Image: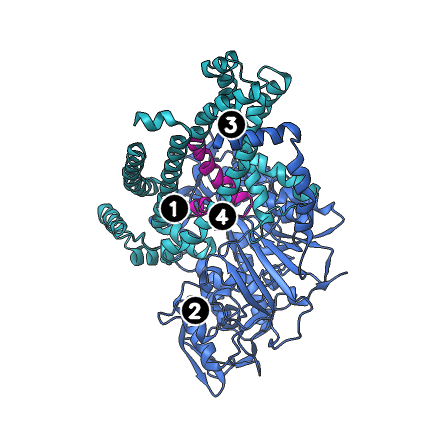
Amino acid sequence: MVGRIGMLYYRLMQRRPLLAFALAAPALARGANAQPARVLRVVAPWEIGGLDPARSGYVFQRMQIAETLVGTDERGALVPSLARGWRLLDDRVTWRIALRAGATFHDGTPVTAAAVAESLRRARGGPGPLAQVPIEGIAAEAGEVVLRTARPFLSLPAFLAHSSTVILAPAAYDAGGAVRAIIGTGPYRLTDLLAPQRLDAERFAGWWGVAPAIERVSYLAVTRGETRAAMAEAGQAEIVTTLAPETVARLRRNARLSVEVVPIPRTRAVKLNASLPMFADVRTRRAFSLAIDRAGIATALLRSPESAATQLFPPGLGDWYDADLPPLRRDLAEARRLLDEAGWRPGPDGIRAKDGKTFRATLRTFSDRPELPGVATAMQAQLREAGIDLQVAVMNSGEIPAGHRDGTLEAALFARNFSLVPDPIGTLLQDFGPQGGDWGAMGWSDPALVAAMERLTAEPDPATQTQLRRRIAAILQAELPVIPVAWYDYPVAFSRRVAGGSVDPLELSYRIAGMRWAD
Amino acid sequence: MGGLTRALAARAVQALLVALVVGIACFAMVRLLPGDMAFRIAAGRYGIDLVSGAAADAVRVELGLDRPWWQQLGAWLGGLIRFDLGVSLVSGDPVVDELKTYLGHTILLAVVALGISVLVGPPLGAWLGARAGSAADRAGLVASAVLRALPAFVVGIGLILVFAVGLGWLPAAGVGGWQEVVLPAVTLALGLAAVSSRVARDAVAAALHAEPAEFARRKGLPEGAVRRRHVWRNAAVPVVAYLGVQLVALIEGVVIVETLFAWPGIGHALVHAVVARDVPMVQGTALVMGLLFVALNALVDLLTLLIDPRRRSAA
């Protein structure tokens, strides 16, 4: 029987080898372009890891399906979102949060203070940043949500913008407290979820804000940068985020696309183990920094000259970025002079040594962020010119915090997000406290810095806050416990079929609700 | 029918062995991978930004990663006997539930790919086999060698550039409609057809000049009848048997193709599970792939028995 079928194929192929394809092609063409109703399609590299807001809340937050109490405006300042507003009582530890009048969940139930408090309590029990806030109690009182902290903690509202704190309806949780459905409050309502790849959502008529112009949206997780670029070029997505650097120039030339690149509050940096003799001296850390050719790395490897870091915090991070701070730069002569002065003299192979110890360190990095190994290798060559022998070890990202804890880490290159919550103080407290931090200082601390950070968490006056932030940035720039290398760009391609698109540098939203079809 | 029962019994025993070996090997390999598992699992759960020593410690305690290895492996094997594949260390959901979604997508992709490759490869090979030594045959050899030598990744990107970016006929990636399956399936099918066309070409070329065919010609049968009765069926046996071998290429290709085309299949899931050191998920995925392999080979056994009466009588 198989023989006969084979013969049939054989005969068909003998006569019209391309017949089947020729017949199928027009049908395929119709199928790909026919859209029953227009859907704004978002393509991003991040897969939907499940329903738990601690894992994938950011997808639901960015797609404006679930909302947090606090949001950010164009400039990154905190603004009310599902909350109508918040105030800190005179005791400086009690926060009262008022909710939007008439807000409802996607299942039609009203957004009550009790439901919000319950959602926050669950977020607090998870691994998100809220666990770092010294919260003593979350309660619903007289229609408002009341949060009490153990000590004054003025950046609390920023923590309520993190995606792990999205507010879900009571019916979203099962008896054990696990999330079983995304029943949020946003302008879009989830209609279909195929984890880990895609979701579909439609406009939610009961949203408290101005009804969005775009009715239907979808999200597709595409991990490969080449595929994402192809989808943008083929017009198969309206918003394509996190473009791979090597595809940006090509997409910019495409008349059907507009590519926007914004800096985001994330910095590629090197942490040094300052308890080692070679990095204990601030002069050697400065020399290390002076030997790095940041402009070269940013231009040749990252294809974004503006991303060369001149200080730890990138512009766009409010007054944490100090334009008056003397920029980090490359100066090999100065680097050599500092190393000489610190007693590290070049040996016969050019590598410096002091008291019989060679200036040799292993730099750990990882490839989850694909550019890091390349940046590490470039730094290796650059540091060698100053007489520093850097060995590069590409490992798992976990080897950095693990090496920090067991003391075996010498140096590490990684990327640090300073806007896990829109206020970087949360990250700084973790990184530069008296004990250092997994992704921050190691074997180094500065009482003046710790004092400035602690004062900042309780300082209500904006002018003093600015002063404190500048002081923190200046200490980190002078002492270099962590050496900034390059900031991050966030390139996004918008199809010209849509208008009103903009990029949120804090990555809290794709801002679809403010967009419309251009034609 | 003795041959059939025996073939199926042998495959059943093989399935049991596969389950055991795959489970133990996956367990051992994931543990031998460098790096602290707790950190990898925490990164898989919460993203690198939220990973800290404290988060890793919490994961370690919650999952009992400090237990001796034989206890952890024993727990998995004990569950396997009860058809319980355990719970994903990353998502906390039962592995079986996760596999259901992934497996459905992979089977769809694999069946379409295999279908296309069977439609293209063997008929083309048969056509070339009947013209062995011609210019077309030599061109076929070159095309097949090139296609097989190119990694699926390159073929896939090429197809995306032509059919999605250039012509705009098909989506470059995604899942949900029938259009999305075409490009990944064709990517896989081209690799498969590249080889099966050569196998079919050789089988047909040999069968055309084998003794039964020559004898039939001598006794005066017209060429059409010779081919119908003595060539196709003889040539089909090695082609079908070879399909079994090709499934290796299919499963290997699925891992890369699914990632490239954002297809939520089992190969894609396996990559993520390995990165996140999600041992039960790796074991479950590999187990399902292994069993799938055995099942498809059993199917190939049945088909060859059906085609070749000699095998039935020999058994």
Residue most extreme to the front: B220
Q: Could you tell which of marks 4 and 2 lies nearer the N-terminus?
A: 2
The quadrant where residue B55 appears: bottom left
- Secondary structure beneath label 1: helix
Label 3: few (<14), some or many (≥20) within 10 Å? many
Q: Nearer the viewer, residue A229 or B298?
A: B298
Residues rendered magenta in the picture: B244-272
The Cα atoms of the two marked residues, 1 and 2, are separated by 31 Å
Q: Is residue B265 found inside the magenta-colored segment of the image?
A: yes
Residue labelled with disc 2: A123
Residue labelled with disc 4: A414
Q: Where's the N terminus of chain B, which quadrant? A: top left
Q: Nearer the viewer, residue A144 or A444?
A: A144
Residue labelled with disc 3: B195
Chain letter for mark 3: B
Q: Are marks 1 and 2 on the same chain?
A: no
Q: Is residue A286 found inside the magenta-colored segment of the image?
A: no
- Secondary structure beneath label 3: helix
- Which amino acid type is shown beneath numbered disc 2? Ala
Chain letter for mark 2: A
- Which amino acid type is shown beneath numbered disc 1? Thr
Q: Nearer the viewer, residue B68 or A395?
A: B68
Label 4: few (<14), some or many (≥20) within 10 Å? many
Which is in the foreground here, disc 2 or disc 3? 3
Q: Are marks 4 and 2 on the same chain?
A: yes
The label number, if any, that marks residue B285 in the structure image: 1
Chain letter for mark 4: A
